[in-house]
Amino acid sequence: MTITEKPWFRKTLLTLAGRPCLKEFLKASKECKSAQDRILSKIITTSQGTAFGKDHKFSSIKNISDYREAVPVNNFEDHRPYVERMCKGESDILFPGKAIFYNTTSGTTAKPKVIPVSKDYFENAYSGLSKLWLYSCLLDNPTIYNGKSLSVVSSDIEGYVEDGTPYGSISGMVYKNIPNVLKSTYSAPYPVICIKDYLKKYYALVRFALAHNITIIIAASPSSVIRLHQTIMDEYEDLIKDIYDGTLRCDVAEQIDPSVRTEVLKTLTPDPKRGKKLEKLMEQHGDQLRPKHFWPNLALVNTWKQGNFAHFIPRLDGFFPDSTVIRAFGYQASEGRAGLVMHNSWDYSVIAGHIYHFEFIELEQRNQKNPDVLQAHEVEVGKRYYILFSNGSGLYRYDINDIVEIVGFYNQFPIFKFIQKGEGVTSLTGEKLSEEQVIKAVVETSKELLAKVSFYTMFCDEKNFCYKFFVEFKDTIDSTTKPSFITALDDKLRQFNPEYKDKRGTLRLLPPSLYELKENSYERFKETLIRYGMAREGQYKDVYLTKNQKVLQFLEKLQK
């Protein structure tokens, strides 16, 4: 074991890197208004000479009022003309110099977003926050680096914009550029992350991971953790053979970039002892085999727990050792990593107010002509807001279309829960049905009827003025339960949404209809979205409510 593989050395270096980041964050959190003013001033001063800065007269901005008068609330389409100029090679457009990278989104539009990342912003908002995040994880979970880590991220480079700058996954870029001492904790080499075939990538990830003592799992979506386990169960015989022989199944190995394939395969060595151990575990537990059996020292699983992802967390019950902590990721999106989770017990985030400038618009005022816009120190506990942010990478008063609820304060920085995407609301006749309402209705209906649901999506049928409920039941249900389920679901939606109740009562909305899906539809659906470029594996977001016609086509193909 080299010194970089020794737990005490890893912890020491991470402490040296993370402690100053925590100190800076804590200091800023004790003086929210002044910290936010400093960040805004820095953003404005740095970008005065850019095309955006000149167009919006940054040189005349002295305070937040001036900023709001000069810069309207923006979305990506407002930024797109500037971004397109940058992609063609122009400098000093949204920030000084050029982008070092473009982060892509998992949007379903024909023209995806590419979010520019500046060098300074990457170092502060990604590398810096990663150090703070990992250090906070270490403080609560001191054994996470006693073994190896298993991470599920996307490849950093998926292509290049016109001037040759790469675009792809920022999580992959962070994974690739993390300090070498932490790279030594990876169970899988970076080229494995770059395998394009979704199912073969998961095989390779678990093939490498099963050979090690995994003490931390990092996966944005809990569905990815479930997929890892399912891959193990489906491919157990081949996986054990590979571990015995020190190999990687040929059809999987050929997916690795040929220029590094030999080097990657050399890292594998025969391990009959581990192979025999895994064989015995399968003999002992059979279909009840879980990660807790082959990774008994797993200390931490870091995944998203807020918003729609909360629906998946109960499905992880019994997966891990009793001592394993399932810790929430902080608030983050393709546009920025703007929130932090500071402790194991948190299922909410604190604003990264030492790096981003934040503004908030109350939920009810979103569509008003001149809504009241609040600063971070002005929000109130219990209220829901649309969140806006400005950063050092060219996003100004950016409306990310996310709804959050303030639940408290960390010193003076607001703590919030992510509720849902604003676009996660559909409306045929003014009912404004939300994903949150659909999820709650399905959960309660399932409990009342004792009908277990594996996967579902509600489709908003704008042509026929009704909702179509596509569902895969976990267990076979009798023919009478299906109509009872959709009727009960309709009743729950009426209960949770007065406008839905009104529109249904007046028949402006027709009754919802139920369409049963084939077994394992969730994985087929997810794989299809990824294959068609409508989602990215490392940033996959589950679809519970949609009006996207392509999604409807995919769902219809999965019907029984």
Image: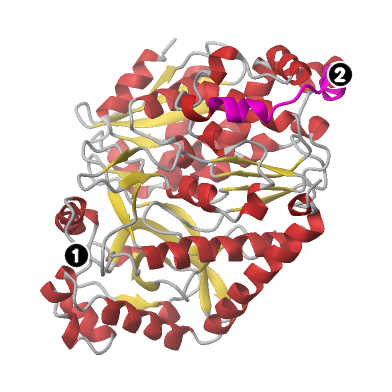
Residue depicted at 18% across the width and 76% down the height: 49
Disc 1 from disc 2: Cα separation = 59 Å
Boundaries of the magenta span: 261-279
Residue depicted at 41% across the width and 15% down the height: 558
Q: Amino acid at mark 2?
A: Lys
Residue 444 visible in rendering: no
Residue depicted at 67% across the width and 38% down the height: 187
Q: Is residue 391 left or right of residue 540?
A: left
Name the image quarter holding residue 19.
bottom right
Determine whether 357 is above or below 256 in the image: below
Whole-percent x, y for residue 258 in the image: 48, 24
**Residue identified by numbered label 2:** 276
Determine whether 19 is above or below 545 in the image: below
Q: At numbered mark 1, what does the secondary structure look like: helix, strand or loop?
A: loop
Q: Residue furthest left?
A: 55
| Among the two numbered marks 1 and 2 on one chain, the one whose residue lies closer to the N terminus | 1
User: Which image quadrant: the N terminus?
Assistant: top right
